[in-house]
Amino acid sequence: MKTELVALAGLMFLATYPMRAIPLLAPGMDRLPPRAMLYLRLVGPAVLAAIAAANTLVTRTPAGTQVLHLDVEAAGVLVCLVIVWWRRNLFLGLLAGVALVAIARYLNLA
């Protein structure tokens, strides 16, 4: 198991937590226009989807070019996106995507 990324995760938490905590700590956030609240609510899922898509759907060849890579992880991301869009529930989508990949790996399909 690789542990060198744990320190990076801690550093990223320290770098990003203040920006994520501002809506919780700022007075008057509940008085923002509905359009601004909708935007702020959708930033997290949009960033998560972009990171997941970039890390699972695109790979680099030894020559350095980027190619579309479809495998079980990509199917997990797509399942997650469809469920989040359909049910408007990020947790349910993440759970379904992770479950799909875990079951595929357990059955040696991935």
Image (tube, grey):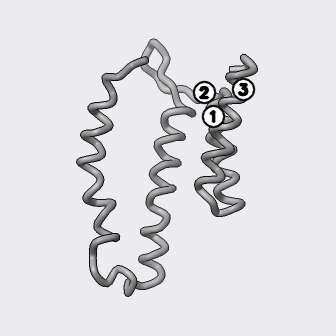
- Label 2 amino acid? His
Residue 69 appears left or right of 32: right
Q: Which mark is residue 69?
A: 2
Residue denoted by label 1: 74
Label 3's element? helix
- Looking at the image, residue 6 sits to the left or right of residue 97; the answer is left
Q: Quadrant of the C terminus?
A: top right
Which mark sits nearer the N-terminus, 2 or 1? 2
Q: Amino acid at mark 1?
A: Ala
Mark 1 to mark 3: distance in Å? 12 Å
Which label's residue is closer to the chain start, 1 or 3? 1
Look at mark 3 in the image and give the residue it sits on: 104
Q: Do residues under tags 2 and 1 come within 8 Å of each other at their CB atoms?
A: yes
Residue 92 image point, x, y percent: 65, 53
Q: Residue at x 43, y 17 (%)?
A: 1
Instruction: State the CA–CA distance, disc 2 to disc 1.
Output: 8 Å
Relative image position of residue 34 (x, y in whole percent): 47, 82
